[in-house]
Image (cartoon, rainbow, N blue to C red):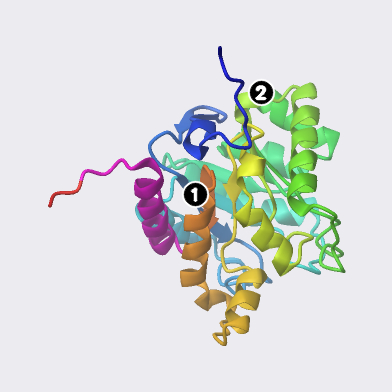
Amino acid sequence: MQIPRNPETEPVENRRPVTWRLRTRSVDTADHTLVMGVVNLTPDSFSDGGAFGAEPLDHDRAVARALELAASGADIVDIGGESTRPGAASVAAEEEATRVLPAIARVAAEGIVVSVDTSKPEVAAAALEAGAEIVNDVTALSDPALAKVCAEAGCGVVLMHMQGTPRTMQIEPAYDDVVGEVAAALGSAADVAIAAGVDPEAICIDPGLGFGKTAGHNLELLNSLGRVAALGYPVLVGPSRKGFLGVVLAAAGRSAEPARRDPATAAAVAMAISAGAAVVRVHDVVGGLQAARTADAIVRASVEVSP
């Protein structure tokens, strides 16, 4: 008698998708977790103090940073021109495009897989035309016009969960079952995207750590990430330097500003990979890559070590 498969108890490695289809290529997660490096072209980034987006904008510096991340081992470089930190104000599409398009075009021309971090259909369309392979949307393609852009371009998409908006998301976020509700919302978002014409194999889902969640919610999501991975899509996790890590460190008497949370980020990255993450988004690619490859070796037991 054949025993039915139970995604709640099935080993994580059997649930991890292998291929994520992008605009002009596919990336494979069978042997290793993909590492996404971050370049924020915003003057008010929480993680780096606006180091690459300060006015007047220096695209040469931003491009150099993107190339450095790729040379350090990043599989994907995520470029964004609008801050999504708690309380952040929105940016006009024209200004956002001015910030990101020159960098995207130059980085993509080097053969690097570029993701554009945007929720605006006009910015996404221009970025894809400039060479981006992925649209990373914190609103999970809630704008039908953005879903249409992604479907027509055939690009990879990241559908992220957020409760509220960047302006409101951290005002008393509440859930009855944060893991179940996030998983259900992401499943619904994927269904909507597919109905709009997005290829199921182009979808990656992100539980949205720090986006409408308390520190406790974020820890629950990391602890039970397998319930999100059970949806069957590649899972992206972005814990890098976020506030919940600061809460954890402060509770341990080890307070650290965002730029000094990379060791804590590495621990979160390793835990996420052990629970089924296929992509991790980090600012410190060198440290993130070390954490990812070590976790990969443990989860996949794939490294031959001499005595």
Q: Residue 305 location, x and y as percent?
A: 19, 48
Q: Give the residue displayed 56% in from the left and 67% down from the top.
A: 52
Per the image, the residue denoted by label 2 is 199
Circle 2 SS class: loop
Identify the mark at residue 273; answer none if there is no mark.
Answer: 1
Taking the image as shown, residue 140 lies to the left or right of residue 114, namely right
Q: Amino acid at mark 2?
A: Asp
* Amino acid at the residue labelled 1: Ile
- Labels 1 & 2 near each other (Cβ < 8 A): no
Q: Which mark is residue 124?
A: none
Query: Residue 70, relative to residue 195: is it above or below?
Result: below
- 35 above or below 28? below
Stretch of the chain drawn in magenta: 283-304
Residue 30 part of the magenta segment: no
- Distance of label 1 from label 2 (alpha carbons): 25 Å
Q: Quadrant of residue 82?
A: bottom right
In the rendered image, residue 246, in percent from the top left (x then y), is placed at 62, 76
Image location (x, y in percent) of residue 89: 82, 65
Residue 199 x %, y %? 66, 23
Q: Quadrant of residue 68?
A: bottom left
Count residues near mark 2 (Cα–Cα under 10 Å), then give few for <14, some for 14-19, many for 20+.
Answer: some
Q: Secondary structure at mark 1?
A: helix
Q: Does 301 appear in magenta?
A: yes
